[in-house]
Image (spheres, helix red, strand yellow):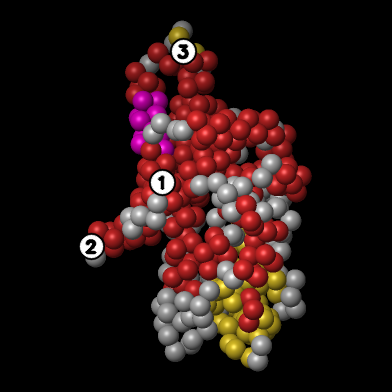
Amino acid sequence: MILSEKHQTMRKLYRQFAETEFTDALLDALDKTGEFNWDIHRKMAQCGFLGVKIPTQYGGQGGDSLAYALMIEEFARVSPVLSIYANTSNSLGGGPLLMYGTEAQKQKYLIPAAKGEKIIAFALTEPGAGSDAGGIQTSASAEGDFFLLNGRKTFISGAPFADYAIVYARTDPTQSGGRGISMFMVDLGLPGVSRGRHEDKMGIRGYPTGDLVFEDVHVHKEDLIGPLHKGFAAAMKTLDAGRLGMAAQAVGIGQACLDESVKYAKERRQFGKPISDFQSIRFMLADMATELEAAREMVYAAALLHDAGSPETAKRCAMAKYFASEVCNRIAYKAVQIHGGYGYIRDYKVERLYRDARITTIYEGTSQVQQMVISSSLLR
């Protein structure tokens, strides 16, 4: 795809910021401690990145989905974990509010999120309900002006430090599957809310993940987002856009792996010559570059379809996420292979990229879930 002059300028801006601000010292600290870095979060907020896709009337930049995808790709090319810092408010954190929130809810929650003043987590997954999101057991029963929330969410990105969480709970116990589920904005400072331990993850370290536990939490009815009992459909629509961001992240990781591999292949000498002279290395690089370009085109096309309101959006976002994440993992594998023993050492960037790449086929819908979405669309 040939980008417009506007989008080319945006891409240059995103790349310049990432290459300047995402220093090696910062990335090493994130990987070592796994802790959230508030300084870089504030810098991203000051530059408007946390609201790239959010309308200007709600504190954002009013950008389109392609601008958003370009930002996530360029940030992930330098740091997959820091790409999530800019992703959350533009995706799973802000998306439900944009699509289903009242004006009062947007004013109260979306504007601070776009400005980086508050962080919103997306709490759908439970210990017994991962890919089967319709199997959630968290409940919310009406009690006067409140809903009484009880349950546990797991693997929630940002849970250890977020201010709010969009929580999905069953409000009609007579219904099963995706029916009878509602969506709530929950202040994580409310009595009865507790946070689990910060999980020690393989990759994407530096954006803490953990559990959220709700014990008789009183959530005001004003914090019901969207229609009662219709939250599951809202979650699925939110994930369509979220998958676009994760597909862009996978492309960024793949590009970083390719960049490192080309550089290393030119520098590393074996048998008296650079390993880039060997056909086996050249063919691996050719495969990496070709698959990566195909994934990138799928992501950009899905972004345009999303903004056009195409009925193909859900399928194409699932395709982009499925293909890009699988390609990302294949490229990361080959990048480590090209580096040989050095690729297994933490001093080399591809070791970290290999660990970061693995989650792309899992979160926001596994590759198998994407196959289900795609095939269901084809067989309607």
Q: Height in image: 154 above or below 5?
A: below
Mark 3 and mark 1 in contact (Cβ < 8 Å)? no
In the image, is 77 to the left or to the right of 326?
A: right
Figure quadrant of the C terminus? bottom left
- Provide the residue designation for mark 1: 304
Residue at x 38%, y 16% (from the top left corner): 278
Magenta stretch, overall SS: helix
- Provide the residue designation for mark 3: 274
Residue at x 52%, y 20% (from the top left corner): 263
- Provide the residue designation for mark 2: 379
Select label 1 or label 2 by which is in front.
1
Disc 1 to disc 3, C-alpha distance:
42 Å
Question: What is the three-letter code of the residue carrying label 3?
Answer: Pro
Of pointers 1 and 2, the one earlier in the residue sequence = 1
Figure quadrant of the N terminus? top left
* Span highlighted in magenta in the image: 285-296
Question: What is the three-letter code of the residue carrying label 1?
Answer: Leu
Q: Residue 226 — which label? A: none
Disc 1 to disc 2, C-alpha distance:
24 Å
In this view, the residue in front, 253 or 341, is 253
Disc 2 to disc 3, C-alpha distance:
50 Å
Residue 208 picture location, percent across and down: 66, 55
- Is residue 91 in view? yes
Q: Height in image: 83 above or below 228?
A: above
Classify mark 3: helix, strand or loop: strand
Residue 48 picture location, percent across and down: 66, 45
In this view, the residue in front, 9 or 262, is 9
Was residue 301 drawn as part of the magenta stretch in this picture? no
Select label 2 or label 3 by which is in front.
2
